[in-house]
Amino acid sequence: MDAHVTNLAWLTAADAARRMAEGEITSQMLVQACLERIAEREDTVKAWAHLDADYALAQARERDEWRGQGRSTGPLHGIPVGIKDIIDTADMPTENGTPIHAGRTPGDDAALVAALRDAGAVIMGKTVTTELAVMTPNKTHNPVNPDHTPGGSSSGSAAAVADGMVHLAIGTQTGGSVIRPAAFCGVVGFKPTFGLISRAGVLSQSPALDTIGTMGRTVEDAALMADCLTAYDGRDRSMWPRSRPRLRDTVLSEVPVTPMFAFAKTPMWEQGEPAMMEAFGELTDVLGDICDEVELPSVFDKVAGWHACLQNGDIAKNYGPLLDKYPDLISDGLKARMEEGRKYSAIEYNTAREFQEILNGGLDEVFDRYDVIVTPATAGPAPKGLETTGRPIFNSIWTYLGVPAVTLPLLEVDGLPLGVQLIGRRRDDGRLLRTARWLVEHLSSDVDDADA
């Protein structure tokens, strides 16, 4: 295998885009590098639900011809992207991780897929998801150590980016399905503010919670991709009319003052693993005077229950017809979630909805003093075995609140990645990502100084 071609698979998306614009490489070279990596590793990692190498190369040739004709190009022109297999694609199956939808061909692109094509991306294929994007594991393994889970439900997306199979990927989060797999696999995962990216054409699990997210190798990559997806779409009633946020520009801008971090253990802290607690103790020591420990109001103890009410109640409503029609094709775990969801009353559901807004008001007081909240992305590194995708206990609180979150692959335990999760004020995604980029550079400079 050509070492130069292999190395192209490991470029950041931003660097690959720059090199293509300068004529140093082509989209065909980039896609070929990814396909060679997939051929080498897919039998182990199993990240893909659908992949057509010939079609991927045909898209790359079209992108190169377009550029060669001197036409204007989009920010992702020629960049390989993986799409989670609950997101409709006109030219590929979308099977939602369930045999019920085997062979399903939507015929139309989801809004975000259309936006990616407009940006010039090469849609490499569909990445593996869990059953109907809930918790039952599928076939994907963690590329860092295949004996461990990659997380879920965006398991294939995280694994593909982490293993050099693709430069960027799309995930979705209803509990912890972007942040957790990104943290377990050691990549950057960005869950934006609820309603920033259209969900039109995406499997609806819980309209009160479902959020589109991006995965890449750097914060800039995650922002670059998100920028292409933020156009207002009236078909998604969770969106709000606003100007596009220009996240990448904000990420690359200088911070006006040194950021302040609020370390929040959250009510789930005691459920974490000792190694995680030790690692975060070391992190906060390194941050020193720019990091204060804060305690969230006691009402946050109820968030896990409210989140479960919304998610399981909506699962029961939206997936219930599938259970009634195909009971033998639904896992026992998902059946149990639906049975639980059917027990909630309208009062309980509406109370859970009401407190989403109320608790954001409480968080505003934290963000008046601090740029971001820093907290674990997961209870520990990826668990061994493929019987579980891990617990979203450190993610669902922020999904419930609809605030932006990003996980950074900054820590390690026993050779496995451990993500650092940063939380931003709702609808202030740019500041969150800029602070995340600053933190990565700040910690890297500390390491360099220590090695000098």
Image (cartoon, helix red, strand yellow):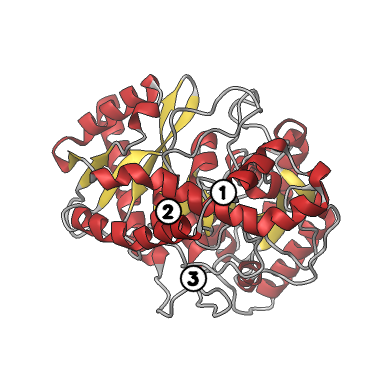
Is residue 410 placed above or below 422 in the rendered structure?
Answer: above
Instruction: Using the image, determine if residue 50 lies above or below residue 198.
Output: above
User: Position of 307 compared to 451: left or right?
Assistant: right
Residue 55 or residue 176, whichever sits in front: 176
- Pointer 1 with pointer 3, Cβ within 8 A: no
Identified at 67% across, 32% down, the residue is: 141
* Place of residue 80 in the rendered image (x, y in percent of width and height, measured from the top left): 65, 56
Determine the secondary structure under disc 1. loop
Q: Amino acid at mark 2?
A: Tyr
Of mark 1 and mark 3, the one earlier in the sequence is 3
Disc 2: CA contacts within 10 A as few (<14), some (14-19) or many (>=20):
many
Q: Secondary structure at mark 2?
A: helix
| Contact, mark 2 vs mark 1 (Cβ under 8 Å) | no
Q: Report the amino acid beneath label 3.
A: Ser
Q: Which residue is mark 1?
A: 343
Q: Residue at x 50, y 45 (%)?
A: 176
Which amino acid type is shown beneath numbered disc 1?
A: Lys
- In this view of the protein, can residue 445 be seen by the observer? yes
| Residue under numbered circle 3 | 238
Q: Nearer the viewer, residue 11 or 363?
A: 363
Q: Position of residue 111 (x, y in %)?
A: 63, 71
Which quarter of the rendered picture does the N terminus lie within? top right
**Label of residue 400 in the image:** 2
Q: Is 338 or 134 nearer to us in this picture?
A: 338
Q: Does residue 173 appear anywhere in the picture?
A: no
CA gap between label 1 and label 3 equals 26 Å
Residue 171 vertical position relative to residue 440 in the rendered view, above or below:
below
Instruction: Give the Cα separation between the discs numbered 2 and 1.
Output: 20 Å
* Coordinates of residue 143 in the picture (x, y in percent): 62, 32
